[in-house]
Image: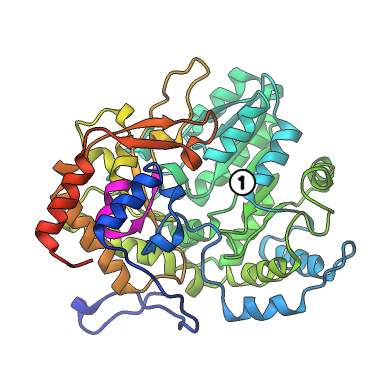
Amino acid sequence: MAVKFYKSENQVPLEMHKVRMVQKLNLLPVDERLKKMQEAGNNTFLLQNRDVFLDMLTDSGVNAMSDLQFAAMMRADDAYAGCETFNRVKDAIKEVFGCDNVLPAHQGRACENILAEAFCGQGKVALMNFHFTTAKAHFTRVGSTVEELIDPAGLIPKSNNPFKGNFNLENLAERIDQIGRDNVAFVRVESGTNLIGGQPVSLENMLAVTDICHDKGVISVLDASLLQDNIYFMKTREARCKYMDVKEIYHLLADHFDIIYFSARKLSFSKGGIICSKDPKYTRQLQVYIPLYEGFLTYGGIDVRTMEAMAQGLYESLDMDYISQGPMFIETLARELDEYGVPVILPAGGLGCHLNAGAFVPDMPHNQYPAAAVGTALYIISGIRGMERGTVSEQREPDGTERYAELELQRLACPRRVFTLSQIKYVADRVKWLWDNRQYIGGLQWTEEPEVLRFFFGRMKEIGNWQERLVEKFKEDFGDSL
């Protein structure tokens, strides 16, 4: 529960933890930031961390671990087989999800690869509320197609809809009938839709999806990577969940979904990945791929010390004081920007604050990549590294045409327990300045474009010299200030 302040003007999220270790940050002068951005091919993934002030690229694997997680790492059992560390992970999964059948993998996308190998293939269709980049890449790599069945209300950038990640249930039932259940690889629910602003899915909608799957005879899969955030939103936005224990929600979902997988880089604030199920027939079907692609069944490519941190982090994912900090910081940043007039995705979701880059530069065509352009501009004027979640994060159609994103977003992730409120205020201040000077933002064009997952390591250049003009305006307003 949030702590209420006596003076309303002082109301801020109150951290229910204290900081016991720090890492020094570096803020380069603006001319150096321009140089570094251009050397990185205008791709924030290719920046070196030493050149970044506030790293808001992702919350994946960069969350601050607790003291108990670090302590747990010291008792790791490094046995190749029959490992006690894995038994402790299984105990944590049993406590949190109620599942006895557990498979380890080195991270979430490894779980997606295993699901692709087991269930996807030529002519198969994977149905989902919205795709995630690596999930789509794995499923299409083996010949499947991906269809998104998000409720249309989820694509409205600013609304009062508390669950914009919900499936369009009528469309789901209809598409299963049209495709035929034997041609449906599975129905995947992403609990916290990454590419449309970290928007949550309601418990009611998730259970309705599983009811349809069971009725139609198709497999239901929950991507639980962002489930911590999603459960926070269920508890605060969904009447049914208000008085439910966090563990009760986890267990209810596990009772209804055939398969659950997650990246522990997000869920549990550690690293690694897990596939689990109440029904052993699914893990038996999947386990053959673990030794093939990952490692033995008791470590799956994860370092045992990391597994100990995962187990402890899973227990901590039941604690609202831990899982609320991220969403509360994100909501605070989004609210301040919205009050200033900066276009952001509302209501605030999980993962991070999402700038509506399409509204920053409404006249910029998709093929000049508005979300990427806003991200490069933000780094240049602030040292803040965000992530493009727009057309660059898509992949071209088989005929080479560009698949334009539904929303052009620049994501400012808020790794959990990492930033202070003064740093969040700095982010808001620099974004406000960029919004007031958005006329200086120009487009980008490819110089090196990989065929798959191009947003990870592709390179671009500015069209014209708008970045230099942006720097001159920054110097005019800030002088010698960093």
Residue indicated by mark 1: 222
Q: Position of residue 172 (x, y in %)?
A: 54, 30
Q: Position of residue 206 (x, y in %)?
A: 55, 45
Asked where in the image residue 340 lies, by quadrant, the reply is bottom left
Residue 422 makes an appearance in the image: yes
Question: Among all residues in the image, which is located at the extreme left?
Answer: 476
Q: Residue at the location (83% across, 69% down)? A: 78
Residue 151 makes an appearance in the image: no
Q: Up-down: is 469 above or below 89?
A: above
Badge 1 crowding class, 10 Å Cα cut-off, few under 14, some 14 to 19, many 20 or more, is many
Q: Nearer the viewer, residue 32 or 173?
A: 32
Q: Is residue 448 left or right of residue 86?
A: left
Q: Position of residue 423 (x, y in %)?
A: 31, 70
Q: Which residues are magenta?
A: 376-388
Q: Is residue 7 left or right of residue 321?
A: left
Q: Position of residue 187 (x, y in %)?
A: 61, 35
Q: Up-down: is 446 above or below 31?
A: above
